[in-house]
Amino acid sequence: MNASEFRRRGKEMVDYIADYLEGIERRQVYPDVEPGYLRPLIPDTAPQEPETFEDIIRDVEKIIMPGVTHWHSPYFFAYFPTASSYPAMLADMLSGAIGCIGFTWASSPACTELETVMMDWLGKMLELPEAFLAGRSGEGGGVIQGSASEATLMALLAARTKVIQRLQETSPELTQAAIMEKLVAYSSDQAHSSVERAALIGAVKIKSIPSDGNFAMRASALQEALEQDKAAGLIPFFVVATLGTTSCCSFDNLLEVGPICNKEHLWLHIDAAYAGSAFICPEFRHLLNGVEFADSFNFNPHKWLLVNFDCSAMWVKKRADLTGAFKLDPVYLKHSHQDSGLITDYRHWQIPLGRRFRSLKMWFVFRMYGVKRLQAYIRKHVQLSREFESLLLQDPRFEICAEVTLGLVCFRLKGPNQLSITLLQKINSAKKIHLVPCHLRSKFVLRFAICSRVVESAHVREAWEHLQELADLVLSEAKE
């Protein structure tokens, strides 16, 4: 494909993408295929001779689209949103064309410097404490990770290195292995599974802290666990507080937990993967109160801030704590400016060496939407969740199982869990809308998340009518 054909095919692809997104409402939100559907539809080996672009596009519709779950459909209410906007897609095209691998400043200065500035822009939108911003001479700063899971792992590994170094300074006879076998991390019983996975990869113990009646981690429960573990000779070192849990969008009590972490010299990492986007709105900023106690903070603009995947924003108060755990300088990555104190080499901030020019997506989106339109987008989703909540409250057969704070509503049919299990089976068998469940204590609960950029009140009400019809069927079958 030469430049001339690329111009023509590129325009065709943009048209195809625009047609797909404009017509997504007409596509079935969840596919009908069974596991293994795709292999019989394509050859066993790659073609020896070139095939045409037309053939490939035809196969996209024939083979790929039947197996796609349409996350951007206005009938997709599962998981949490995955961001999508035309400015971000255009920026992704440019990132792909430039094709730099921004592991050092020298490998592409604009890639590094735009990321630093964009993370400061975003930090200011959230009103993060100055300590988290790079500014011109701060100790903190931000970095784009691939996911919140990566951010949690990076924070845990940095905290592990920091506590080992601290203990060995006071007790040189302690080996790294002797310290590591006693290290303990903590998170709420509502924390995402990636927190436990980070501890598994980091080879440290992790303890789940029982949450309160609002599914939040509180100081008393954390303090009790710390005292028990210290009495047993263990070494607490790392706490993850979740703002906007995956199951029900609950919020750990930062104002209680934060001071304990600071007093006990525990690294406090805040995981706000979904909810963090809402903090750009003044009316939701209070949910971030206590962030000043944290050592690191992360959320995903690629969930709810119109920046396409992947773009997970992570800030640290002291970047030296992060880079000190991972810094290696082989001669082929060294450059003349690296010791100037004026630049960042982001390879020291992340797990992989290579990195894409992801800050272009933030730059395009922030400039083409502006803060006010981004705030309006968040507020619209919250209003739609409130609308769904009000519909539920009008039907005595249902109960709401957690406080509705942002764009997620957790609900169930009153009575035995089997009623809600059957209801979800019927919902996802009908494939008119798509939901996923969670467990809250002993209850089987359905999650209704406002996800799509194009979802409107009419879609929410249509989904509600569908749910009511299926609930009628479930309850009538249960009486038979």
Image: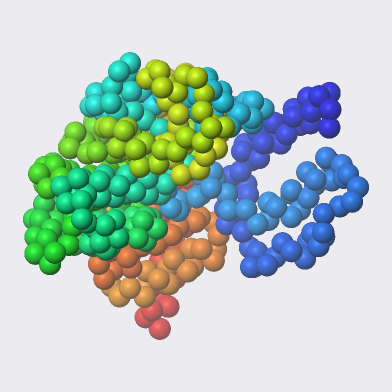
Of residue 199 and residue 27, the one placed in the foreground of this image is 199
Q: Quadrant of residue 314?
A: top left
Residue 392 position within the rendered picture, expressed as x and y whole percent measured from the top left? 31, 54
Q: Can residue 3 be seen in this view?
A: yes
Q: Which of 250 and 70 is in front in this view?
A: 250
Q: Where is residue 359 in the image (x, y as percent from the top left)?
A: 49, 27
Name the residue: 67% across, 27% down.
97
- Image quadrant of residue 122? top left
Q: Is residue 216 visible?
A: no
Say left or right for 9 vs 427.
right
Look at 80% across and 45% down and name the residue there: 56
The image quadrant where one finds the C terminus is bottom left
- Residue extending farthest front: 173
Whole-percent x, y for residue 332 in the image: 57, 32
294 w.r.t. 396: above or below: above
| Quadrant of the drawing holding the N terminus | top right
